[in-house]
Each structure stands twice: as C-alpha cells, then as structure tokens.
C-alpha cells in the first residue's frame, strides 16, 4: 500500500515537513524558493547547464539514459553511478549560490551536484539507492526540483509493501536524511500524462 506523505502534513509544517521512515527520515521544504524565484532559476538552469546525453550498457546494447544530465563539483570530485564515470564541471555562479543556500537551510555540506533534466513524461529514473561507496556509509542527499511537479516514490529494501509517495513541486527541496539510502529505494517514474519539463538537482558529498 502506498501512503501519500504530503497529503496529511502540508499545513502542519509550513516550513519543513519532517517525515519519519522505518530506518530513515525525510524533510520536505515545499516552498524552498518562492514561485517567482523558482521560475527565474528554472529558466537560467535550462540555459546555463551543459546538458549531456549519457548511455549505459544493457545486455550488450548501448542505450540512452531517459533524461539529460550533468555533474558539477569541486575540483577532482569525480562520481561514478550506473556505470557512468563523471568528471566534474566547474561550479557555475548560479549553482554555487544555490548550493550555499541549501547548505545554510539544511546544515549539511556538499561538494557536488548531479543535475537531471526530464524533458517529458517518458524521461525518468528507475528504482535505485544513492549508495555508491564514494558517498560514504550513510549519505545525505538534498534534492531540489524546478518545473513540472513529478511523483517521487520510495519503497523499503526488505519490507515488501512498505512504500511512500510525494509530489515534488516547483521550487521544493527534499532532504533524504540518515538511513534512507541504506534502507530504501527511490524512483521518479514515467507518466502517461502530458507534462512539461522538470529539472532536478541532487546535492551530494563525495568522500
């Protein structure tokens, strides 16, 4: 059974919705940026990011990942995920300013950001955990969304049927806290609905 975590909590915590999970926790900032700020940032990110189409090997066939992406970070902070070895592009002033605000609001320190661009409902990311060894034993991930709202789903790695769902809105921030990557999988699934573009920034700390 899937529980919509946002539905019952939005008005109780206007700044941050704190969500307890079995073996983890989330904090959801619905209005991390105002609508006008988010609109401006979305337009700037579309133009400023050096978008790339990455490919992965599946059953001996090279296939495009269903989204565009880019990895930015501190010098020499390379990141390997899904068979992709990404070397960091230098922080842009825009990304640096966003990072500073995310760090101030969350109290976490990050040295890299993976930027994903979902062009339509067929662009997606399937079930996974951000648990690469380079992220350390218990990664904290800050996920910032701009553009089209999309559903974000989680399921427990060991407890069948334990699932949660949130709708990540324009200008919102989701902080995945201690235990989430160890105990939960997450995805942004495809949708048959006609949807506009979405940009997602996931801030990480490479050890």
Image (cartoon, rainbow, N blue to C red):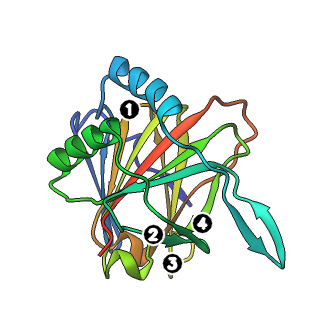
As helix, strand or loop, the secondary structure at mark 4 comes to: strand
In the rendered image, residue 176, in percent from the top left (x then y), is placed at 34, 60
Mark 1 or 2, nearer chain start: 2
Q: Residue at x 62, y 49 (%)?
A: 52
What residue is shown with label 4? 127
Circle nearer the viewer, 2 or 4 = 2
Relative horizontal placement of residue 107, taking residue 98 as reference (left or right): left
Report how far apart the C-alphas of labels 2 and 4 lie in the structure: 19 Å
Report how far apart the C-alphas of labels 3 and 2 lie in the structure: 24 Å
Mark 3 or 4, nearer chain start: 4
In the rendered structure, find residue 79 and report the number of the disc placed on it.
2
The one of 85 and 67 positioned closer to us in this rendering: 85
Q: Residue at x 21, y 36 (%)?
A: 15
Residue 110 sits above or below residue 195 on the image: below
Circle nearer the viewer, 3 or 4 = 4
In the rendered image, residue 181, in percent from the top left (x then y), is placed at 40, 72
Disc 3 + disc 2, Cβ < 8 Å: no
The one of 83 and 1 positioned closer to us in this rendering: 83
Report how far apart the C-alphas of labels 1 and 3 lie in the structure: 29 Å
Mark 2 or 4, nearer chain start: 2
As helix, strand or loop, the secondary structure at mark 2 comes to: strand
In the rendered structure, find residue 171 and report the number of the disc placed on it.
1
């Amino acid at each position: 059974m899937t529980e919509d975590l946002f539905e019952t909590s939005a008005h109780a915590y206007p700044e941050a919705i704190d969500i307890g999970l079995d073996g983890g926790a989330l904090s959801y900032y619905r209005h991390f940026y105002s609508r006008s700020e988010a609109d401006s940032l979305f337009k700037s990110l579309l133009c400023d990011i050096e978008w790339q189409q990455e490919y992965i090997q599946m059953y001996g066939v090279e296939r495009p990942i269903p989204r565009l992406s880019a990895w930015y970070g501190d010098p020499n902070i390379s990141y390997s995920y899904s068979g992709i070895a990404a070397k960091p592009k230098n922080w842009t002033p825009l990304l640096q300013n966003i990072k500073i605000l995310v760090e101030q609001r969350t109290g976490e320190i990050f040295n890299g950001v993976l930027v994903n661009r979902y062009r339509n409902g067929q662009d997606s990311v399937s079930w996974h955990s951000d648990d690469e060894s380079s992220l350390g034993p218990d990664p904290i991930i800050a996920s910032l969304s701009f553009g089209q709202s999309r559903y974000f789903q989680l399921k427990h790695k060991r407890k069948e049927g334990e699932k949660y769902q949130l709708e990540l809105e324009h200008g919102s921030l989701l902080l995945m806290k201690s235990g989430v990557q160890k105990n939960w999988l997450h995805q942004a699934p495809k949708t048959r609905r006609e949807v506009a573009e979405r940009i997602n920034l996931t801030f990480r700390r490479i050890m």
